[in-house]
Image (cartoon, grey):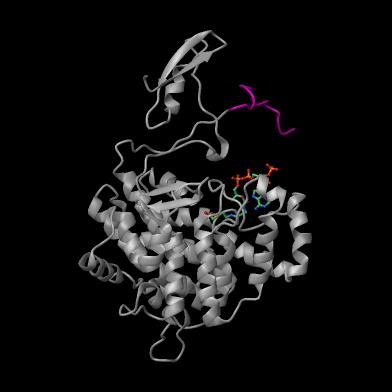
Amino acid sequence: MSDTLTIKDNRTGKDYEIDIVDGNISAKDLRQIKINQGDFGMMSYDPGFMNTANCTSRITDLHGSEGILRYRGYPIEQLAEKSTFLDVVYLLFNGDLPNRQESSDWEERLTHHTMIHEKTKSFLKGFNYDAHPMGVFISTVAALSTFYPDARNVDDPDVRLLQACRLIGKTPTIASYAYRNSRGLPFIYPDNDLSYTGNFLNMMYRMVEPRYQAHPVLERALDILFILHADHEQNCSTSAMRNIASSKADPFVSVAGAAAALYGPSHGGANEAVLNMLKEIGTKDKVADYMNRCKDGELRLMGFGHRVYKNYDPRARIVKKVAEEVFEVTGRNPLIDVAMELERIALEDDYFVSRKLYPNVDFYSGLIYEAMGFPMEAFTVLFAIPRTAGWLAQWMEQMEDPEFRIARPRQNYQGPGERHVPDDYKS
Ligand code: CMC
């Protein structure tokens, strides 16, 4: 039996045999289906990319109906339990986990890049005190492009890796500076003796003490959250990254563009939206009423539903567990009761069950961030920092892909045919 698909065009009565490769057909093969020689040929039509693969990737494996997520073949649960965020970045970039020596060399290499150019400070000071941290983050990451003109040489693999290390090193510094600027606090320089998340918390929260020591449970909790957010195959922001980078734009502006895609409440902005929603509901007794408004189509239950997960998001399960560990240290965030009541009703309610709507990664993460003292507006930045690793891993893979092409979708044009501008159209 050959791996082909036979298509019969009932307009012409003609049969076409199309190759099946890795279980898929190439959309380009549809172009041979024509009603006459002058016909452009058939295209596939897929708004929102509901069923279109735009690349071959070997990084993240996701089985949405079973709730399975693996980075380079390793289950997310095992990575969250046994690994660290920086080792996961190594895994995403290199294809395998580092050994002890590789891990410490890698950490040392990345911490060389945690400082940002002093001029960035004056740039940051130009923002209003109440500027949304995601707007500040996106603009500042894009501005780094102007400090590293070498980054434009995207065809050189060594240059690519150098920029990727710069970005992994600098994003926590940018995020903390954005926060401190909004509070009128002095910027804190990175401390490379601390862990990746320990240093980030130090840059966020240090006041007059000579050294800020993050609580180890909170430092580890943030590291786990970073692991969970590191990559998620071809989501909206990663596809934006690949789209922008396909024109060979440098990685700083490409990551800024990907972060812009993440900002929206349907994607990474959902963690902030969830907390707003929980605050609006306020108490458990108001949950049922809010759920009814979601079912009537008036509202969306934020932190619920996913394009690819039609089962419990495995990341949400881990986040829920981490939340309990964090609350042991910080005290229980009372909104967790509202969240758990929402989840309880949704998992039993036919509206949510029939549409396979389950909690996603953003449902419980905001409760942890709030308990750790992060302001709500900073939540999506806490998603962007680790996702930078995924964007960059996907970008480096893309740049080495033999099928690399500039991204340029087609359209289904249904507007007017040719018409003429009247001489007196303004009269
Ligand atoms: N609350 C209520 N109804 C929903 C929700 C929700 N959160 N999500 C989907 N639905 C309904 C939707 O109304 C539709 O119903 P019907 O078939 O009757 O019209 C059905 O479920 C299918 O929804 P869809 O909009 O076609 O699904 P999608 O795959 O296009 O959207 C989504 C996915 C994530 C944008 C959507 O589920 C959503 O808006 N969720 C809330 C926002 C959110 O939590 N986003 C974070 C996603 S996870 C983090 C990340 O990776 O970005």
The residue furthest left is: 101
From where the camera sits, is residue 300 visible? yes
- Image coordinates of residue 159 in percent, x first then y, are 25, 55
Residue nearer the viewer, 403 or 334: 334
Q: Quarter of the image containing the C terminus?
A: top right
- Image coordinates of residue 112 in percent, x first then y, are 27, 71
From where the camera sits, is residue 373 visible? no
Residue nearer the viewer, 29 or 162: 29
Does 421 lie within the magenta span?
A: yes
Residue nearer the viewer, 128 or 1: 1
Residue at 73% across, 69% down: 284
The image quarter containing residue 345 is: bottom right
Q: Is residue 274 left or right of residue 33?
A: right
The image quarter containing residue 114 is: bottom left
- Image coordinates of residue 169 in percent, x first then y, are 34, 67
Range of residues picked out in magenta: 413-427
How many marks on residues?
0
Instruction: In the rendered view, tell whether residue 297 sits above or below residue 230.
Output: above
